[in-house]
Amino acid sequence: IDELLSGVKAEIALKLFGDDLEVLAEKGKEIEKLIRTMKGATGVQMEPITGEAQLVIRADHDKIRQEGLNVDDVMNIVEKAVGGETIGQVLDGERRFDIYMRIAESRRKTKEQIESLIIESPSGAHIPLGRVAKVDIEEGPPMVSREKGRRRVVIQCNVGLCAGLSAFSRR
C-alpha cells in the first residue's frame, strides 16, 4: 500500500525537486552518500537519471535534397526499420494481436548498422542513411520523473536491524 501511495518501493524515500537535471544528480548523490553513513540504513540508492544510451539521428537537409529525397521520407524509413510498424492483426477468438514488423535486432545493434540502412530515392538509387543523416549514440536520462509539474529524483533506503535490536532478540 505504501508503494501505491508514494510511488516508491523502499521504506524511506527522500524526494528532491528541481529544474536542472545536473544539479539534481549532483545533490542526489551527495544525499545518497550521506544516508549511506547512517547507522541502520540498508539498500540505499538513488533512482538513475543519467546514463541511458539513446539513438539520435539528425537529418542533413542539404544532402537529403541533393539526393532527391525529403526529410519525412528518410525519417519514416528510420522509424519503421528501427522502431517498427504494425502491419496487421491476428485474431484468436475474442483477442487481437498486432503483427509488428521491423528489421532484425542483429541488424540494428550498432551505429554503423543503422548508418548502413538503405533508402531508395525516387530515381531508384540506393542511398545509405549515413550519407544523408548523422547517426549518434548519446547518453541521456532513462526517465525524467515529475511530480506536480516539477522534475524530481528519489533517494531511497530501508531500515535494517541495528546491533541493539539484535542483542534484544537473543533474550
Image: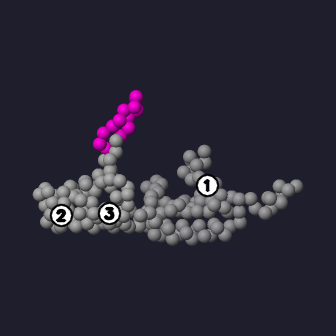
Amino acid at circle 3: Gln
Q: Which mark is residue 38?
A: none
Answer whether labels 3 and 1 touch (C-beta < 8 Å).
Answer: no
Taking the magenta stretch, the answer to whether it contains residue 90 is yes
Q: Residue under circle 3?
A: 113
Of tags 3 and 2, which is closer to the observer?
3
Residue 53 shows in the view: yes
Question: Quadrant of residue 154 in the image?
Answer: bottom right
Taking the magenta stretch, the answer to whether it contains residue 160 is no
Question: Quadrant of residue 60 in the image?
Answer: bottom left
Q: Residue under circle 2?
A: 64
Residue 18 shows in the view: no
Q: Which residue is at a point 31% across and 44% down the rendered structure image?
A: 86
Crowding at mark 1 (Cα within 10 Å: few <14, some 14-19, many 20+): some
Crowding at mark 3 (Cα within 10 Å: few <14, some 14-19, many 20+): some
Of tags 1 and 2, which is closer to the observer?
2
